[in-house]
Image (cartoon, coloured by chain):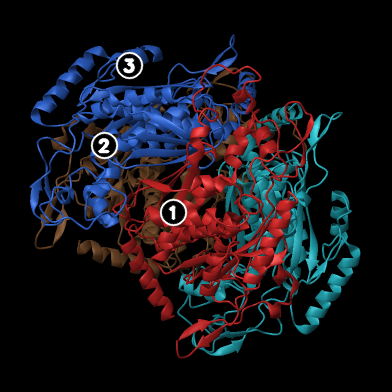
Chain colours: A red, B cyan, C brown, D blue
């Protein structure tokens, strides 16, 4: 069973995670993870902080000489800005409380921002300083999830399973990619400032982001994750919580600011006749295998992978912090105020796609470990190869 | 921690579940569960089987004299049709295999239906008789999930938490309910043959279902679950898998045939400016509480309930079994065929809403038990009341 | 991942369990389970109830034509005495409370028995009728655990893994079996009224039980579970909760009335020099494999199976309900009383061994599924065979 | 739900853990954790490495200004010796393999030590360098478990729950503490070089350790953990895996080198008549509460805490690495050799007791969080106080 826990405040010393259950012998380097960390930080529409950070992972356990050990993998990502926050975020109680008027004392946050966890988090955890909420609820956490996902990708890569993500919509502007191949989408996306494979749409998206910036506003959008070369049979209909399609929805909806998810034809399937939706089954006599001409199911039947590419889209709401502020109420004074800007991104949908890849990769890796077992990569591969041959001869 | 496991084949003797972690002292009767079982079986567009079943739950453990005991609750739902399937579904190996041509021998299913788990399930589990797949992958399983959800509702009811569901779309025909109250939607829905609160739309939906029936086709749609009187603070941003919004998405997407889910403004939020999306925060001086004028967030901030109604919609694809058959391939002979009808529902979106209520109720009950602890209802209520007073004075 | 939940009150209608995660294609019959249920009911020193019951399992899901389906296995065991308890244990609220003096009203239990969960259970769950506690806390629950364990054994059996249990001590009388083989112990035990492989000791144990009976007293003892043909490599040192040795201790200590557990040399190892304890490693040139001449470790190194037999002993306290009663206090009146007899077993250590086999079998089956993966028995065997060959050539 | 994962190799850069589910507002300082880390490193019979280390914890998340935040707590413990191991334990693949004869190349470990995970770990994980096993299987891991346990103690401390451990046996020499109070045992233990409260026995234990050292041998022993002021009602009989007594056995047996565990009277209970074992129940009219005159049950009935002190003993086998070596076989050459010393502790039972406290504290904290719920310490205390008052008036 693959599992992990992560921690870390946005302006704390570092983010960390412990990943348990990864087989031994999987090639894994910090450099590979750093590539995804860099991909997460790019994208038109980002504010200033991204330039500060330049995230780098450090493995502190579970990896030796370039291979996993089978023991828990410890990952750290330093917060580069930490030196400026050491006093505010100090672990120790420190000296007595400062007098009012002192700058540090004034860093106590009492103004909740609409659309954030600020107000509900403070009530839930009985915090009087909203900093204690926003430091954890912040999307900064996604950096460590991307690192964990990159480790999962390293495992998937050994089985030829490949993931990409691309932006399908920003601010209502759709991309048209239906005639592009997996590799075309991948390459066009990696070249695009907004990680959109449709260059024409990308240009309009950038325009829209500019417009939002001028208005002091923000934008959301939709990204799509596609996975190729997935074996038939991951997930199960045997118990509801083993449906892999549902687990992917769980993982994607757990990313900050996500408000919707759909698989394959998704919501559109709800509007069509059945005869327009279900993917008919054919048999290739020469290659001796079953195949489909369509993939409206997005790679799943009965919650189980069916060998078609997994296609899943996620809707992200606009960034909750705007230059042109929203109305709110101070939790201490109960006075109304206009919510100020803590950070200045306009649109982070491109980055969200990279995060989406990571969480999908994690769930797939967990499903692979569950189905194929094995404590070492060689054992897992032996099991996988046996199954692949079985499927071929089915 | 609230948890359960369920089992049961579609034409087996019965469905069953064991629910563990329910506090002692919760009023719970079979009659209350049967109400939801009956609601699940209604709805225009259902085929013949629903009339056979008339599901009834039987508690076989964990409930005594009308109250939960704190011990695991055992639930059974008999399959009324079982007597006709006893031989085919027999547990014991029975007499030697029958000769070809024998009717029972011919009940071996080798023809996978597109859109079902049939093909992938047979490959995954190495079954040569697809009956071994379809019996479990069938939506018949949702009956026991509704029963488990009804037990969860009994707990929620003690805290004044109320759930409804209603159909928002069938076959592309939308319902308009934006100006209706919670109670108006509930009452109109319960009166509607398609569980749609907008009577005009309901009429068109019925027309559309008739049209589909005539074409030998099927329809999907969208249902919405709304929950009122949810306390602030269920779920958490502290770890990704504790975000209650994501857990609801997990649960809803785990229902057979669901292809998308969205919370609050959902996918539409991805198309708007931030200033149009985030719910501003206000303070009522007289009532001394925070409030919102909008609920675009659908009841969640940071994955935590914010005291607003939970609003979540789920997209269901059309029923996968059509009168006008789909192309497929026999798994034994590898000959193409046209997939035949195993059951004859045209549209089950109304029932899906009731199932949706059940799985949402379960997740909320689990979140309540996690936050408020307590081994008896009286202890849990004492804890809840203390928190409610704390929130009032916050 | 193999998991299960069980439920059922001691005098309720039935006991039930749902077992999830068993691979498809495992041969499994009710008759095989009934054998272990019968073994659990035997043993010198049992009181009257055992004769009533004659437990039989019924599979209601997950098994068809003698093989598992890969879907959850539902198991029921009827409580034969149920007809006499229907009113007292009724699920429904029933008619209004009876007047004092009415026999049924007097079945409310307010007298907690020392050594049982009676008092603490009533406080924890806010019960005023201790029946609500004792019905679940009762060792009657072990019948369903034995049934679940028998299903686990069916899986283990496919891999040649064999479990036995035998009584090592009753009332301080030790058995001497150090020179007996696995099969000798098994056969002698199955023939013994007290499930003790040492016939001389068995005779003394029976005498001691007679003595206890005459005194109106009860006895405990120690049983040992031995497992042969366990593959090297189950469990892991990689995270504390994956040590299989510790998981076995967990499972055994979770059986009612168990107060201690030890593996291999156990507590005695704590009293010896290291040079007397650790099992040296040798290599057989001709058979080309590593071996040991001793098994003080009891089959585990680093919490992982090392290919040696698993040997684990569990200490059971005497039955808590005595003919010669213990002092206690009525929870309603707060008056002292002398605790009366609810059941009349003198010693159930022989039965406890059978239960011990069951819980050990479960943990081993779970560890096998985790290591070897696979959704069908054929897939799991293919993986296992590959690993076995790898170990041979190591 | 309280949960954690930990990682870290013995000679890696650091040990780390992520603790999730701790309520907000719990006072927690690194200094408090360091006290327990220091207690773990003391004890007569330790070898050289302990002097190097002087473990210090660093909180890197989840704690601010001396209080927990409710977010995951990240803990690091640096391995002081890391600088000498950087090349051998390097994460990156590094330069090409060194020629034979090169010292670094020769650090490849191919000689498995009896009693360690060396051989089975290498087989399980397909490692050819046993270093990849011993680095994780090492008891060095217990340092981070002690740190996690210290955080758990910080929570328990807020509820007045106090834990101690003391050595009951070393090398067969028993301590007599039956007439000492909790505080007397605690104070005498903390003063003792072998953490034994019986000064006479302690002297003999030290003699025995000296003797073992002279012989080049090692010793094990038995330690006891005692917990006072535990509320009635932690754990449950409702499902086997919720019995807190069994969970404690799980946790203690998961510590490296533990071979047995017993609660209260333990194995001795198996040798007595029931009338000598069960703790009778009395009622104090003036104080209006139930009480016992004995605690043979060790604080548990039905797997639930009964308000009596928890008393649990664990048997540790002798250290597996001896100066006078054990026979073994090289995994590469298959040549026999005599197992060499990697470290030089003679007896670590005193330290094991401190580790035992930690794992018991963790399970109790988890049980407290489960029963009392609450996201902040103030909420948890409010719930606890309500329950305490209820129990008083029961």
Picture disc at residue C267: none
Question: In which chain is the residue bearing label 1?
Answer: A
Left or right: B79 as drawn, with respect to D223:
right
> In the rendering, at what x and y percent does residue A311 appear?
58, 68
Circle nearer the viewer, 1 or 2: 1
| Residue located beneath label 2 in the image | C266
> Which residue is located at x 40 percent, y 58 percent?
C369
Circle nearer the viewer, 1 or 3: 1
Residues under numbered marks 1 and 3 in contact, where contact means CB atoms less than 8 Å apart:
no
| Residue located beneath label 1 in the image | A34
Circle nearer the viewer, 3 or 2: 3
Question: In which chain is the residue bearing label 2?
Answer: C
D103 in relation to D296, above or below = below
- Tag 3 secondary structure: helix
**Quadrant of the snapshot with the C terminus of chain A:** bottom left
Picture disc at residue D190: 3
Left or right: D363 as drawn, with respect to C60:
left
**How would you rate the neighbour count of disc 1 (Cα within 10 Å): few for under 14, some for 14-19, many for 20 or more?**
some
> Which residue is located at x 76 percent, y 71 percent?
B46
Residues under numbered marks 3 and 2 in contact, where contact means CB atoms less than 8 Å apart:
no
B343 in relation to B255, above or below = below
């Amino acid at each position: 069973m693959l599992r992990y826990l992560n921690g870390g405040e946005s302006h704390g010393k570092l983010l960390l995670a412990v990943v348990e259950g990864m087989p031994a012998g999987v090639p894994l380097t910090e450099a590979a993870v750093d590539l995804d960390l860099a991909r997460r930080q790019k994208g038109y529409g980002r504010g200033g902080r991204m330039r500060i950070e330049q995230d780098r992972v450090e493995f502190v356990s579970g990896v030796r000489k370039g291979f996993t050990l089978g023991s828990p993998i410890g990952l750290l990502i330093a917060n580069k800005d930490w030196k400026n926050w050491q006093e505010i975020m100090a672990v120790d109680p420190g000296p007595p409380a400062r007098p009012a008027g002192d700058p540090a004392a004034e860093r106590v946050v009492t103004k909740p921002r609409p659309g954030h966890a600020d107000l509900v988090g403070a009530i839930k955890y009985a915090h009087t300083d909203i900093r204690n909420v926003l430091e954890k609820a912040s999307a900064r956490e996604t950096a460590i999830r991307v690192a964990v996902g990159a480790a999962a990708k390293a495992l998937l890569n050994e089985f030829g399973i490949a993931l990409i993500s691309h932006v399908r919509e920003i601010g209502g502007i759709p991309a048209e990619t239906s005639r592009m191949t997996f590799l075309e989408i991948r390459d066009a996306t990696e070249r695009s400032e907004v990680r959109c494979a449709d260059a024409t749409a990308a240009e309009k998206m950038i325009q829209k982001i500019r417009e939002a910036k001028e208005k002091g506003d923000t934008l959301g959008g939709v990204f799509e994750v596609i996975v190729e070369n997935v074996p038939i049979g991951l997930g199960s209909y045997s118990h509801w919580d083993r449906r892999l399609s549902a687990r992917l929805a769980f993982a994607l909806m757990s990313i900050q600011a996500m408000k919707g998810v759909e698989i394959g034809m998704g919501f559109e399937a709800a509007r069509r006749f059945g005869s327009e939706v279900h993917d008919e089954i054919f048999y290739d006599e020469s290659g001796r295998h079953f195949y489909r001409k369509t993939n409206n199911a997005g790679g799943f039947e009965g919650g189980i992978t069916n060998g078609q590419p997994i296609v899943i889209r996620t809707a992200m709401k606009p960034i909750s912090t705007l230059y042109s502020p929203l109305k709110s109420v101070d939790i201490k004074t109960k006075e109304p105020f206009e919510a100020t800007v803590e950070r200045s991104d306009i649109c982070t949908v491109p980055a969200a796609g990279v995060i989406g890849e990571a969480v999908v990769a994690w769930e797939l890796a967990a499903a692979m470990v569950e189905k194929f077992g094995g404590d070492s990569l060689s054992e897992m591969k032996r099991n996988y190869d046996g199954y692949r041959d079985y499927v071929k001869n089915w």
